[in-house]
Amino acid sequence: MAKRMFEKGFGYKSVARTLGLSFNTVRDWNREFKRGTFHARPNLNQYRYGPEIKQIVCDLRDEGLSWRQIEARTGVIPATCRNWVAKRDIATTEPTSSNE
């Protein structure tokens, strides 16, 4: 897909946004494309997940599933799942005042 977008004249930033990949990765691909050496074979860890999958992971954890069970259902590695749930928990925890 990236190669076709480069061929149509898209820049690396728009390609990165469209594919949900790092700007740096796609910039490097664009340089390779211009040299004629581009072959898109991204690693799985280069893909970015949308808010929907993050919410699904958090919901599954709230239901009591283990990290490995969540991985089996979603394909997201346990370390990433833990990070998302921790960030969600931090964001939803209200700070307490010590001056009560």
Image: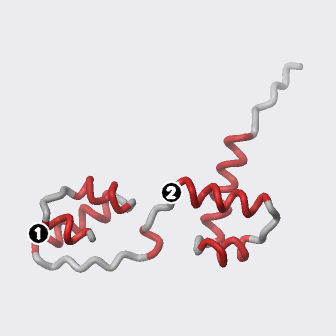
Residue ID for mark 1: 34
Amino acid type, residue under disc 1 in the picture: Lys
Q: Quadrant of residue 3?
A: bottom left
Q: Say whether marks 1 and 2 touch (CB < 8 Å).
A: no
Q: Position of residue 75 (x, y in %)?
A: 58, 75
**Considering depth in this image, is 100 or 10 the residue closer to the camera?**
10
Q: Residue furthest top?
A: 100
Q: Which residue is at 27% across, 59% downward?
A: 15
As helix, strand or loop, the secondary structure at mark 1 comes to helix
Amino acid type, residue under disc 2 in the picture: Gly
Quadrant into which the N terminus falls: bottom left
**Considering depth in this image, is 95 or 60 the residue closer to the camera?**
60
Compared across the picture, whether 3 is left or right of 35 comes to right
As helix, strand or loop, the secondary structure at mark 2 comes to loop
Q: Is 58 above or below relative to 70?
A: above
Residue 50 badge: 2
Q: Quadrant of residue 80?
A: bottom right
Q: Quadrant of residue 29?
A: bottom left
Q: Nearer the viewer, mark 1 or mark 2?
A: 2
Q: CA distance from mark 1 to mark 2?
A: 30 Å
Q: Position of residue 68 (x, y in %)?
A: 71, 76
Q: Which residue is at 11% across, 69% downward?
A: 34
Q: Position of residue 67 (x, y in %)?
A: 72, 71
Residue 1 badge: none
Q: Residue furthest right?
A: 100
What kind of colouring is applied to the model shown? secondary structure
